Amino acid sequence: MGGVSYAVSEINLADHMIYVTLPLLDDKRVFINAVNHMGNAFRFVIKAFFEREYRFKRVNFLPPDDLVTGEFLNRYINKLGLSVYFDMVKNVNCFNDVRAKSSIKLKRNDQFIIISPEYSMTALSIPQVKDYLRLGKEFVAKMGDFLK
C-alpha cells in the first residue's frame, strides 16, 4: 500500500509544480521535473500492482524497474479496463526515458522538446501535461482502489 501513497504524493507534487511553480518561474527545468514526478507516480503504483500480483502468485517474477511500466502496458492495462490511460502513461514514460539519455532540452512557445542522442524528438506541451495530470490523478486513484 506504500506504493499508492508515494504515487499520490508524487502526482500532487507534479500538480503543484505545473499549476503554481511553473507560472511563477517559467523555467523548463520545473516542467521537466514535474513530468518526471508524474512518471514516478505511475511507476510506484504499477510496481505496487506487480508486488500484489506476485504476493498472490499470479505472476512468477517481478519485472525490473526499467521494464515494469512497459510490461504493465503490454499485458495488464486492457485487462483492468484502463486502456483510456494507455497513451498518457506511454507518452510520459517515453518523455522521461528520452530525457534521461538526452543533453538537449529546448523550450519553444508552450512546447518542451527533448532530442535524444539518436536525434529523435519527443515533445510535450503545457496544455497536454495539464490534461495528463487530470488523467494521471484518475489513474492513480483507480489503481489505488484496485489494490485495496
Image: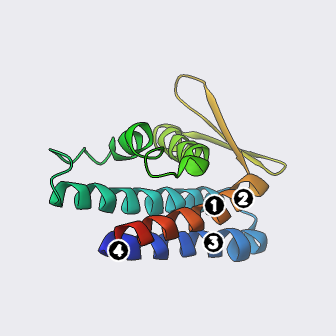
Residue 23's spot in the image, x, y percent? 78, 71
Q: What's under tag 3, amino acid-wise?
A: Asp
Q: Quadrant of residue 20?
A: bottom right
Label 4, label 1: how many angstroms apart (C-alpha)? 20 Å
Mark closer to the chain start, 4 or 2: 2
Label 4, label 3: how many angstroms apart (C-alpha)? 24 Å
Between circles 4 and 3, the one closer to the viewer is 4
Label 4, label 2: how many angstroms apart (C-alpha)? 26 Å
Label 3, label 2: how many angstroms apart (C-alpha)? 11 Å
Q: Are marks 3 and 2 in contact (CB under 8 Å)?
A: no
Rendering colour mode? rainbow
Q: Foreground residue, 46 or 64?
A: 46
Q: Residues within 10 Å of mark 1 (few under 14, many from 20)?
A: some
Local SS, label 3: helix
Local SS, label 2: helix
Q: Which residue is mark 2?
A: 131
Between circles 1 and 3, the one closer to the viewer is 1
Q: What's under tag 1, amino acid-wise?
A: Leu
Q: Which residue is mark 1?
A: 135
Q: Residues within 10 Å of mark 3 (few under 14, many from 20)?
A: many
Q: Which quarter of the rendering shows the N terminus?
A: bottom left
| Vertical arrangement, residue 112 with respect to residue 98, above or below | below
Residue 132's spot in the image, x, y percent? 65, 57
Mark closer to the chain start, 4 or 1: 1
Q: Which residue is mark 3?
A: 15
Mark closer to the chain start, 4 or 3: 3
